[in-house]
Image (spheres, rainbow, N blue to C red):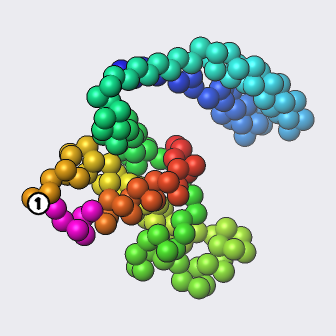
Amino acid sequence: MFVLTTRAPRAWHGYDILDKLKKDDRISQETHDRLETLLIKFNSGLQKFYDKLALNIVRLKGEDIWEAEQTIAIVVYPILLKLRKEKHGAPNVDPIDVPEHLRMTVEQKKAYNVDGTTDENYFARYDYIMDEMIFAFKYILDGKQYDYVNFDRREYERVENGLQLFSKYYFSLWD
């Protein structure tokens, strides 16, 4: 397997400078708004340019599809590790996907539904989800699914759970 990817960065340039100028009262709100509109148009064009530069090459050999779960895990596992370390947000996690001690109380759920107030375990719930996915892909990378001598049913059930969570939270895999 050969994978080369050069994903273009998302083009969000200039907003921090613009906001600082406004905060320091060096420009008016009206000027800020006009410049922001121009930045949106500029960044949209810049993003289209970046997207044309993006390069994704994947070359697979026969053995890469013989054990496709291994090939997929080779790519997914380091991505999950990096996301776990560098994430800047978290999705709302379904309470059935986490242990009881991480779930919201009735009062916390009401507060979240009213104004989006998060509880102290909001990010811990997604950390748990990420850890389960990471465990599953590490298990696959280590080839433990083929170790019939040392097979551990609880460990394998955790892998199955991690893979189901990967599917369920797939569109939440962002930084």
158 relative to 93 in the view: left or right: left
Residue 131 appears in the picture as rendered = no
Residue 49 appears in the picture as rendered = yes
- The correct choice, above or below, for 171 with respect to 79 in the image is below
Residue where numbered disc 1 is placed:
150
> Is 162 or 126 nearer to us in this picture?
162
Residue at the extreme bottom: 106
Q: Residue at x 57, y 58 (%)?
A: 91
Provide residue 14's location: percent of width, then percent of height.
68, 27
Provide residue 73's location: percent of width, then percent of height.
34, 41
Q: Which residues are magenta?
A: 151-156
Q: Report which quarter residue 72 is drawn in.
A: top left
Q: Residue at x 57, y 18 (%)?
A: 54
86 relative to 46 in the view: left or right: left
> Is 158 or 111 nearer to us in this picture?
158
The type of residue carrying mark 1 is: Asn
Query: Which image quadrant: the N terminus?
Result: top left
Q: Residue at x 69, y 74 (%)?
A: 113
